[in-house]
Image: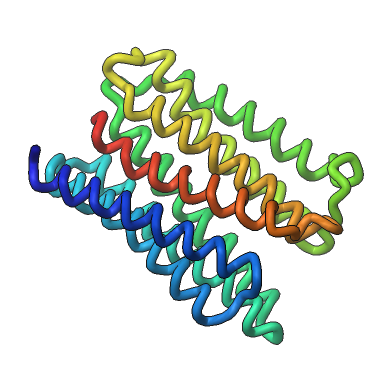
């Protein structure tokens, strides 16, 4: 087995272990210790991307790693708001911005990594993004959420997330699944990202949705998403 693949496997296993430990402590409290555990887990998904990039260097893999780095920044800043309540608004918006930048890197990766990118994928993905954004913006009551001042930000971010996720799917459909399996796998990771953010919206903007089961499912689906996205490099 290639050395980079061995290192990748080890980081995935370590990441799963630290994720389990983090979830146990995170359901009880949020403090510096849980933030450190979360950071270690996030470092693991970055390392999976780095080690795979060493084995398969490309523009695609480099952009994926850049997106993963934005992810760890978002992780840290969003959890810091629980410890620095006076800066909660700033840290929340910083977390949103970091993840948004990460999605832009992912968009660039899908386009750069396509075997023969077709422009038709852009308007189709945009259509999905617009629908998702409108549902988020106008479906506040239906989803029993109260976004407050984060209503527009949530809609824009949600639209961006749906855009990059379905860009991966449409690229695989129109450019060939066999040649673009990495972007289809990216789509799967994006779906887990969407599920995670739906749960997170409930914990942030809903009532009675910050239960241990919500915390665990939010983080498990999020880390599955990032590890799957990092693993797309295997299929390039």
- The image position of residue 15, as x and y in percent, is 37, 56
Q: In this view, does 114 lie above or below 40?
A: above
Asked whether, in this view, residue 24 is left or right of residue 173, the answer is: right
Q: Which of 222 and 140 is in front in this view?
A: 222
Looking at the image, the residue that sits furthest to the left is 2
Looking at the image, the residue that sits furthest to the right is 141
Q: Residue at x 42, y 68 (%)?
A: 39
Q: In this view, does 176 lie above or below 199?
A: above
Q: Residue at x 59, y 60 (%)?
A: 96
Please state, as top left, top right, bottom left or bottom right, where the C terminus lies in the image.
top left
Q: Residue at x 29, y 14 (%)?
A: 178
Please state, as top left, top right, bottom left or bottom right, where the N terminus lies in the image.
top left
**Which image quadrant is residue 82 in?**
bottom right
Q: Nearer the viewer, residue 184 or 25?
A: 25
**Which image quadrant is residue 148 in?**
bottom right
Count up the numbered dots. 0
Q: Is residue 8 above or below residue 98?
A: above
- The image position of residue 76, as x and y in percent, is 50, 70
- The image position of residue 118, as x and y in percent, is 39, 19
Q: Which of 183 and 223 is in front in this view?
A: 223
Asked whether, in this view, residue 134 is left or right of residue 29, the answer is: right
Coloration mode: rainbow
Asked whether, in this view, residue 176 is left or right of residue 149, the answer is: left
- The image position of residue 53, as x and y in percent, is 19, 46
Q: Which residue is drawn at 23% across and 48% down?
A: 8
**Which image quadrant is residue 126 in?**
top right
């Amino acid at each position: 087995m290639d050395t980079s693949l061995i290192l990748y496997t080890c980081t995935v296993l370590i990441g799963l272990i630290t994720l389990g430990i983090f979830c146990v402590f995170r359901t009880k409290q949020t403090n510096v210790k849980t933030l450190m555990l979360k950071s270690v887990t996030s470092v693991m998904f970055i390392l999976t991307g780095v080690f795979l990039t060493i084995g398969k260097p490309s523009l695609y893999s480099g952009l994926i790693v850049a997106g993963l780095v934005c992810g760890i920044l978002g992780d840290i800043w969003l959890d810091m708001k629980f410890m620095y309540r006076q800066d909660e608004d700033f840290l929340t918006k910083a977390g949103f911005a970091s993840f948004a930048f990460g999605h832009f890197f992912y968009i660039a990766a899908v386009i750069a990594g396509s075997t023969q990118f077709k422009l038709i994928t852009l308007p189709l993905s945009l259509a999905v993004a617009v629908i998702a954004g409108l549902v988020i913006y106008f479906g506040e009551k239906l989803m029993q959420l109260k976004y407050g001042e984060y209503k527009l930000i949530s809609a824009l971010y949600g639209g961006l997330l749906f855009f990059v996720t379905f860009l991966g799917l449409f690229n695989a459909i129109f450019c060939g699944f066999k040649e673009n399996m990495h972007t289809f796998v990216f789509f799967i990771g994006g779906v887990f990202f969407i599920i995670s953010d739906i749960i997170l919206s409930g914990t942030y903007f809903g009532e009675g949705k910050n239960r241990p089961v919500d915390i665990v499912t939010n983080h498990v689906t999020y880390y599955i998403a990032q590890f799957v996205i990092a693993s797309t490099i295997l299929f390039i």
